[in-house]
Image (tube, rainbow, N blue to C red):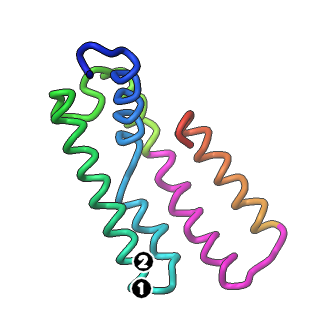
Amino acid sequence: MYREWPFFRSVLSNLDMVLAKTDLAIASRYAELVSDKRLRREIFDKLSDEWSRTRKWLAAITGNAELLADNPTLARSIRSRFPYLDPLNHLQVELLRRYRSGDRDERLLRVIHLTINGLAAGLRNSG
């Protein structure tokens, strides 16, 4: 299917791009917002396992050991955004922690929305 069906190849190309934009270390920071440790671990472990399986099978189908091997320009573009997105992610986690602890300051909510917009813009189509 990958060799002969352009639609399937396109779907896997999009999957490749989305996986390249993910960062499980950052995801674990968001997971820390879940107060129930057992639930957090259970769900995050499932998510991590599924990410690994998806990555493994994508490589098996495409034959590419690295994400975005067929699109080095996009790979470079995504890597160049991480230094700007990582601090926004860490800031957003802290802001969400404050909001969830009861801080309902209007300015806090405004900054949360700004981090959401900033991350969406930086991630572009998968934001």
| SS for dot 1 | helix
Quick one: 28 or 60, which is closer to the camera? 60
Snapshot quadrant of residue 9: top left
Magenta region, residue range: 83-106
Q: Is residue 18 above or below residue 26?
A: above
Mark 1, residue position: 37
Q: Is residue 45 left or right of residue 115?
A: left
Q: Residue at x 24, y 37 (%)?
A: 58
Could you say which quadrant of the image residue 38 lies in? bottom left
Give yes or no for residue 43 being in the magenta stretch. no
On screen, 119 above or below 72? below
Q: Quadrant of the C terminus?
A: top right
Q: Is residue 98 magenta?
A: yes
Horizontal arrangement in the rendering, residue 118 relative to residue 22 (left or right):
right
Q: Is residue 76 visible?
A: no
Q: CA distance from mark 1 to mark 2?
A: 5 Å
Is label 2 in a helix, a strand or a loop? helix
Front residue of 25/59: it is 59
Q: Which residue is mark 2?
A: 40
Say if mark 1 contacts mark 2, CB within 8 Å: yes
In which quarter of the view is residue 42 placed?
A: bottom left
Residue 20: x, y in percent? 35, 39
Amino acid at circle 1 = Lys
Number of numbered callouts drawn: 2
Can you give x and y, in whole percent of width and height, for residue 36 in the image? 47, 86
Q: Nearer the viewer, residue 28 or 110?
A: 28
